[in-house]
Image (cartoon, grey):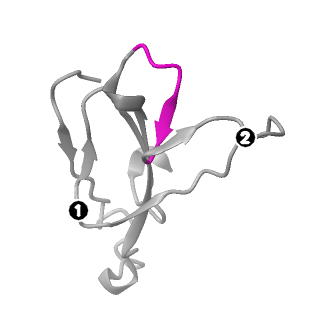
Amino acid sequence: MSNSTTYEVSVADDSNFYPDNYDDNQQQIHREEYHLTLKDGNIQSDVLMLNGVPLVLTETKDIPAMYPVLVHASNPISVAPDSIVFATLKDFKAPACS
């Protein structure tokens, strides 16, 4: 995490890991991303933002619905300053994850 640098992270699966089962046409078109940021960029804020929406309990003290941002799978993951990003990489092929 940096307070001044935006990172662009590119991710690619290993097409050689399952060469017989690999089909470029079956790759996911989109991925789900969850961006946690500070409200108004204030590091002392009591409110955390999830994809630009305040992440606060509902009136009944329940956790609110958390909706992802859909991003084209070929785009890099953009991590803004003072933020954390969770990305869902469906059907990702990586030897370290097997």
Q: Which mark is residue 54?
A: none
Residue bearing mark 1: 75
Residue at the spot 80% in from the left edge and 34% down from the top edge: 61
Amino acid type of the residue that numbered disc 2 sits on in the rendered structure: Ile
Circle 1 or circle 2, nearest the eye: 2
Count of marks overlaid on the render: 2
Residue ID at (40%, 50%): 95
Which residue is more in the foreground, 57 or 6? 57
Cα–Cα gap, marks 1 and 2 = 30 Å
Q: Are marks 1 and 2 in contact (CB under 8 Å)?
A: no
Compared with residue 9, is residue 4 higher up or lower down, i.e. above or below? Answer: above
Left or right: 24 in relation to 50: left
Instruction: Pinpoint residue 6: horizontal percent, then vertical percent.
Output: 18, 36
Q: Position of residue 36 (x, y in %)?
A: 44, 37
Query: SS at mark 2?
Result: loop
Query: Looking at the image, which residue sits at the far right?
Result: 60
Residue type of the residue flagged with mark 1? Asn
Prevailing secondary structure of the magenta residues: loop
> Dot 2 corresponds to which residue?
63
In the picture, residue 57 is in which quadrant? top right
> Which residue is located at x 36 percent, y 62 percent?
17
Residue 45 versus residue 40 in the image, above or below: above
Secondary structure at badge 1 equals loop
Q: Which residues are magenta?
A: 44-51
Whether residue 47 is situated above or below residue 11 in the rendered picture: above
User: In the rendered image of this protein, does residue 59 appear above or below residue 81?
Assistant: below
Task: Specify the quadrant that holds the N terminus.
Answer: top left
- Outermost residue, bottom side: 25
Work out which residue is located at the far left of the displayed protein and give it. Answer: 5
Q: Position of residue 34 (x, y in %)?
A: 46, 48
Residue 83, position in %: x, y? 35, 31
